[in-house]
Image (tube, rainbow, N blue to C red):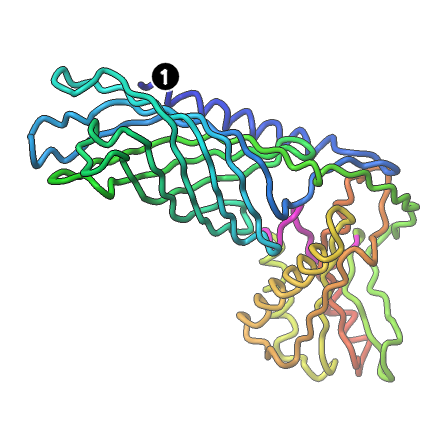
Amino acid sequence: MKRWMVIPLIFASATAWAQSETSSTRGSLSSEAVSVAPEGWVPFLGAGAGYTTSDHTGSGQNLQEGMPTSIKLLGSYYTESTKGVFDLGFGYNNQQFSRDLAPATTVSGPSIEAAARYQWESRWQAGVIATTLFDRGEYYGANQADAQFAGLQALKEFTVAPAWLMRVGGRILTDLNVNNETVSMALLDLQLGWDPSASRQSVRDVASTAPSRPVAQPTPNNALGSIKLETNRPGFVRFEFDSAQISNPDRNRVRDLARALEDRKDLYSSIEVIGHTDPVGTQAYNQNLSERRAASVRDILVDAGWSRSNIQTKGLGETELAIMSELAPNFGDNRRVEIQFNGVRDQRQLRDILSRFE
């Protein structure tokens, strides 16, 4: 059984390598084939293997002990926000029994399953799952023809190539209709999905005119003037692909900025946190993602003691693409948040403080 458990771990390692290779070599300036966050229905082909046991409070012989394996075809529905994932699937399940007194050496047959999971920004998914094994109830001691199980499932999703997704994880199930005993299953899951709508060509040529040194640019948004905190690359905080999570170094920079301006609210009237995305994906999805990125930076400032009412957030989606160079052809500089100070009363003093972070 151990060799079966090793196989999904090998696939998981290969997935992580493929994902890093994809990120480093993806696309070109004029034509970039990349993957977008899935929406709607996506088909998956899945496989699983694990271990079955019981608490043998009835017979005392643990006759259900053995190794289950399965293959299945799943339809996964991703909600528009991609925070909810729902599965419906049909498959073929095999159970090998290891006890000499078990009613059979091996049994096989069709199965169905349904699952509902929550997906975090890190693309970890966790939720509940239920499955029915048709016409195998007698082999598990069930009180009807079918054996039914339910439990918890956790999966990590990866993008392995444009339009191709992989999920690796596991589930723990317990029976719903076995008398006098509790039959449990623990299985490792490996799922490969294909989302044809995720593969697209981004034909957006952007000239390279990046500034040669850090600069805080004033923009005349109001009578007193505005200053946007910038660096030698666009944005003050940058993000990974399809993520609103802030890295620890950027999180510390935002906190340091909050501390530096804690007692200098007299220099400006308000600030605006502006989120941006790269051009990959639908406009509606990118708009939502840019708003979440802006909100994540605002929340750090609020946690540092700033007044929420004095912080505006705005998402611009993919409408303002950042300057790119041939050294950064994967649109990475567009996954950013900018901080703009409005109603500036003393530009010289504010610039002096902001220069520490540029």
Image quarter (top left, top right, bottom left or bottom right) of the N terminus:
top left
Tally of marks: 1
Residue 77: x percent and y percent?
56, 46
- Write down the quadrant of residue 33 in the picture: top right
Q: Nearer the viewer, residue 190 or 330?
A: 190
The residue shown at (50%, 24%) is: 11
Residue 84: x percent and y percent?
52, 52
Q: Which residue is mark 1?
A: 3
- Write down the quadrant of residue 131 in the picture: top left
Q: Nearer the viewer, residue 68 or 248?
A: 68
In the rendered view, tell whether residue 263 sits above or below residue 244.
Answer: below
The kind of residue tagged 1 is: Arg
Q: Nearer the viewer, residue 91 or 258?
A: 91
SS of the residue under disc 1: helix
The residue shown at (57%, 66%) is: 300
Range shown magenta: 234-247
Image quarter (top left, top right, bottom left or bottom right) of the C terminus:
bottom right
The residue shown at (66%, 31%) is: 161
Q: Nearer the viewer, residue 343 or 79?
A: 79
Q: In the image, 254: left or right of 182? A: right
Residue 324: x percent and y percent?
85, 46
Q: In the image, 306: left or right of 225? A: left
Q: Residues within 10 Å of mark 1 (few under 14, many from 20)?
A: few
Residue 215: x percent and y percent?
83, 60
Q: In the image, 264: left or right of 151? A: right
Majority secondary structure of magenta residues? loop
Q: In the image, 144: left or right of 156? A: left
- Find out whether residue 305 is within the magenta segment: no
